Image (tube, rainbow, N blue to C red):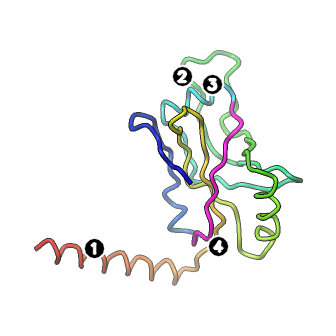
Amino acid sequence: MSSKSKPDSPSIRNKKATHKFEILEKFECGLVLRGTEVKSLRQGGASLDEAYARIEGHEVWLVNAHIPPYKHGNLMNHDPKRARKALLHRREILKLLPKVHQRGQTLVPLRIYFNDRGLCKLTLALARGKSHSDKRQDLKKKDQMREIKRAMRR
């Protein structure tokens, strides 16, 4: 998976995803967007906090992702919360389908970015929800690693 992006292009991340979910697999896919959505994404004001992906038939849809209306748009501006189609190969969708139907597993968007060719890409993750104790253990590990790094610098 190549995640090369130009340094000046914005990258919208779902910061809560790694805290709330255990990431099992990652997939890179394209997004079907309208012109004003692309312009708004280039300004970098989108949010993936409450977003998720859903498989309907043989299509994957990104639901609840908020891309604000383009500032210089007119009456033809897009709906900020509309469902957007994610472009995955059929074999990837067929591979994901039984996994998503398992209890506790879902598709979570991690990042929207522009690749080196200027195309908008979405990184989806097959994820399992963490329990409260799992979250606490992860925070403890993070604190321990931070302490070790501080000690190494001294």
- Kindly state the secondary structure of the residue where label 2 is placed: loop
The amino acid type, in three-letter code, at marker 3 is Thr
- Between marks 3 and 2 in the image, the one whose residue lies nearer the viewer: 3
The amino acid type, in three-letter code, at marker 4 is Arg
* Contact check, label 4 and label 1, Cβ < 8 Å: no
The amino acid type, in three-letter code, at marker 1 is Arg
Q: Quadrant of the C terminus?
A: bottom left
Magenta region, residue range: 22-33
Q: Position of residue 18 (x, y in %)?
A: 51, 65
- Kindly state the secondary structure of the residue where label 4 is placed: strand
Q: Residue at x 71, y 74 (%)?
A: 104
The amino acid type, in three-letter code, at marker 2 is Lys
The residue wearing badge 4 is: 128
The residue wearing badge 2 is: 71
The residue wearing badge 3 is: 36
Considering the whole magenta stretch, tell me its main secondary structure.
strand
Measure the alpha-carbon separation of dots 1 and 2.
Answer: 41 Å
Left or right: 111 as drawn, with respect to 60:
left
Counting residues from the N terminus, which is met first, the one under dot 3 or under dot 2? 3
Measure the alpha-carbon separation of dots 3 and 2.
Answer: 9 Å
Q: Position of residue 17 (x, y in %)?
A: 55, 62
Q: Position of residue 50 (x, y in %)?
A: 62, 54
- Between marks 4 and 2 in the image, the one whose residue lies nearer the viewer: 4
Residue 67's label in the rendered image is: none
Report if residue 39 lies within the magenta region: no
The residue wearing badge 1 is: 146
Q: Quadrant of the N terminus?
A: bottom right
Measure the alpha-carbon separation of dots 4 and 2.
Answer: 37 Å
